[in-house]
Image (cartoon, rainbow, N blue to C red):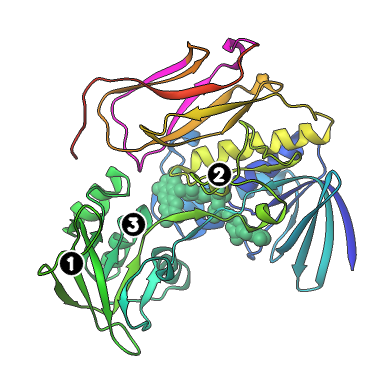
Amino acid sequence: MIVRNVDVAVLGAGPAGMAAALAAARGGADTVLIERESHLGGILKQCVHDGFGLVRFGEKLSGPEYAGRFVRMVREAGLAVLTSTFVAEACRDGDESILMLVDRRGVTELHAKAVVLATGCRERSARQVMIQGTRPAGVMTAGAAQYYVNVLGYLPTTRCVILGSGDIGLIMARRLTLEGAEVLGVFEAKSIPSGLSRNIAQCLDDFGIELHLSRTVTRIFGDDRVEAVETAAVDEKMRPVAGTEERLSCDGVILSVGLIPENEVAEALDVPIDPATRGPLMDQNGQTQVLGVFVCGNASHVNDLVDYVSESGERAGAAAAAFVAGRRTRRLLPVIADSTVLLYAVPQFVDMDAPESGAVVYFRSREELGVTVVQVTAGGETVARHRYQHLRPPEMERLEIDLSRIPFDITFLNIGTESVAVAEVKS
Ligand SMILES: Cc1cc2nc3c(=O)[nH]c(=O)nc-3n(C[C@H](O)[C@H](O)[C@H](O)COP(=O)(O)OP(=O)(O)OC[C@H]3O[C@@H](n4cnc5c(N)ncnc54)[C@H](O)[C@@H]3O)c2cc1C
């Protein structure tokens, strides 16, 4: 078996991983970028719609265009890149991480002083939502449908329903319609949509596709291929309401029922996971509870904007290089989110020994709120605050903290709302 040593190994070459590898190399670390697919770009390769890069480049790019800019930077920087290489196993050995890389030639044992996990997220599948009936062909996740249409050039359904109102499902409702399929509706069990408002407007309203809230798919019919589904209204506990069933003929059921950070490698490295985000517990630079193991992008928590994914990659890559160069001490303050108003906040810790980078806290609200002031307090003092016109669970928000404002004797920070001026906004 080949054994290789490296300063920083970056796992996953989506936008997070590419940004992390570039930053680690800029920081002077001998860096390798590892990707299981044959091309760099991650999920962006299949996102042919525009809306990427407004924050970073001030332009509305498609996913491949946004990825292309980073691929070019990776090439120009002369980074070591391993494609078609899968990280099959990982373990810790003292201060190092050992990764087992599998490619066409066999297995390589890679010893890395620091690892950046940029493995993205995976979609919840049909097995994770309880639907009665048979398991015929034609039931697929929205990401799989997107891959069929945008990468392989196949139309996987001619008449379908979409279950769940996540952004990928909304985008695929429009894409399938443009490609000639009939989308009978988007069915969402919750009383509010899961996707961004702009996607509801641009992907459903503009194409006359109906969004059915508090309604779900209760049965799938068909032997070899989906022939029909049954939908029904649900009550506030998500139980189907008898007498509201409707049968719809279709040959496809597209699932858009949530994303989960991909963290098999993190778990193999004994990295503690936050049950709220399903990603690792981390500080503002993505360093997890295991020294020398960093995380960024959708592997840390599910992001809706690629610009912030790249931002988190840059922070993690730069911090991994600093770690390799000798920065080992940390003074961690927990960031405690008020769970009555916030679904989660990341990072879960700030490292006061790395104050030069400041800290960016990302959070989602638990429910829809109108004008809201969110603040971070340290021992009763406000150290960061921002007024938001509205907060909605599908929209991740961001708040910058100047760490120099935090008194030395503080042991934790709180993030919550200072005021909610207009109670609840109904969309
Ligand atoms: C359908 C869709 C539409 C979106 N629309 C927008 C939009 O309009 N605007 C916007 O700003 N953002 C949008 N986003 C969000 C944004 O694009 C994503 O959050 C971002 O691309 C995620 O980047 P990532 O690098 O964290 O993960 P990914 O792009 O998923 O990259 C992870 C990479 O890791 C690799 N990998 C995983 N495990 C291993 C392993 N064990 N070994 C080797 N490699 C591995 C994978 O193959 C993959 O290439 C959208 C996302 C989706 C899914």
Please provide percent x and percent y for residue 301.
52, 45
Residue at (62% x, 49% y) in the render: 118
Label 1's element?
strand
Magenta includes 179?
A: no
The reply to whether the residue tagged 2 has its Cβ within 8 angstroms of ligand 1 is no
Whether residue 67 is visible: no
Label 2's element?
loop
Please provide percent x and percent y for residue 272.
64, 46
The residue labelled by disc 1 is: 232
Dot 1 crowding, Cα within 10 Å, few <14, some 14–19, many 20+? many
The reply to whether the residue tagged 3 has its Cβ within 8 angstroms of ligand 1 is yes
Whether residue 16 is visible: yes
Identify the amino acid type marked 3: Ile
The quarter of the picture where the N terminus appears is bottom right
Q: Earlier in the sequence, mark 1 or mark 3?
A: 3
Q: Which mark is residue 171?
A: 3
Range drawn in magenta: 384-408
Measure how far apart labels 1 and 2 are at the Cα level: 34 Å
- Residue lying furthest bottom in this view? 224
The residue labelled by disc 2 is: 274
Q: Earlier in the sequence, mark 2 or mark 3?
A: 3
Identify the amino acid type marked 1: Ala
